[in-house]
Image: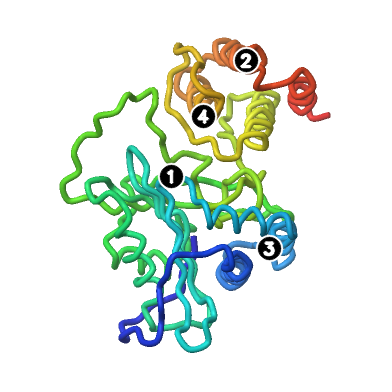
Amino acid sequence: MATSGEGFEQLTQIEVLPATPEDALPIRQLIKDSWLNTFVNERTGITKDDVEELFKKGFTPAALADMAKALAEPREGVANFVAKDANTRALIGYCRVRKMPVENLLAGLHVAPHIKNRRVGTQLWEKGQGTLDPTKDTVLWVEVNNEDAKAVYRRWGFAETDPPELFEEEPMKSGAHRTMVKMIFKAKHAPTPDLDPSRAKLTTELDKPGASMRGVPDNGQERESRLRAPKEATMPESVRRKILATVQVLADKHPDAGMLQTTLGAPLDGSVEEVVGQACYLLLNEIPKLYRDDGNPKEAGEALSKIVDRLCELGILSSDERAKIDRDSVGH
């Protein structure tokens, strides 16, 4: 997530509006420009070529059509807003928020790099915040060394977790990567959610900025194959590969499936989208914990095989897809 530095001049001649399908191309260009301005530097090691590679598929007619559709028909709980110059109608800011059962998510906020001291980001956040559940905390993920953005978020009331919760993205073309840190805006009177934990959608790897499974990162619309499965010292590389390969196939087939918290002992059941959400949660959270916390590789391997078996039994994975996962697991 990136934002420009903001001062305290009164905002003038700026309109903040719900995003429309016609905004798809300028939003995508804004996000790319934001990446180039914020992350291409010696600090991150990210190069211009990295960004070009990352976004090269995002400007195709099909990708833009998908984004336009997502803006026209946002998923439940999602709101997209744009800031435009009232005179030129140029798009100068974009914000995406999502209302979820457990917490709210500020999924993306970008301001045109040339805009300074006009509180565009603040106006976008205030509009997005108005659509969220005020009784729940709001979380966001920001590049760990992006001090300008973190300063803005702190001014809005966000704070890093203690200890910091970090998320390391998949390396880019050059080998450089972003490390993201979680920030939370605490609700003043947040009640304990009355939810069945086996059905609670969480902000986990698939919802973190830059970790979507397909498309362009940080646009909040598509899934990008840049997810890094947790890489513990005791986890065999073949297991890590199998986790990543399985999630990749599931996310390609069901890009809108949300994470659903469950346990390894619970059966994978429900609608296809629910089963996919449960499976991804187990693959990315519970199985790595068996290595990290329990030191039980045998149980973890058996659990992984059972998940894949169940997905095949339900027809969610085909025999060809399973064969591909097995090939990818050994690096072929």
For label 4, the residue is 277
Residue type at tag 2 = Leu
For label 3, the residue is 51
Residue at x-position 74% and y-position 25%: 325
Which secondary structure, mark 4? helix
Name the mark nearer the viewer: 1 or 3.
1
**Label ID, residue 314:** 2
Residue at x-position 65% and y-position 32%: 244
Residue type at tag 1 = Glu
In this orientation, does residue 92 appear? yes
Name the mark nearer the viewer: 4 or 3.
4
Pick the front one: 11 or 302: 11
Asked whether the beta carbons under mark 4 and mark 1 sit within 8 Å of each other, the answer is no
What distance separates the C-alpha of mark 1 from that of mark 3? 30 Å
Name the mark nearer the viewer: 4 or 1.
1
Asked whether the beta carbons under mark 3 and mark 2 sit within 8 Å of each other, the answer is no
Residue type at tag 3 = Val
Pick the front one: 88 or 187: 88
State the image coordinates of residue 321 (x, y, percent, origin top left).
Answer: 75, 24
What distance separates the C-alpha of mark 4 from that of mark 3? 29 Å
Going from N to C along the chain, the mark reached first, 2 or 4, is 4
Name the mark nearer the viewer: 1 or 2.
1
Q: Residues within 10 Å of mark 2 (few under 14, many from 20)?
A: few
Which secondary structure, mark 2? loop
What distance separates the C-alpha of mark 2 from that of mark 4? 14 Å
For label 1, the residue is 76
State the image coordinates of residue 251 (x, y, percent, origin top left).
Answer: 62, 36
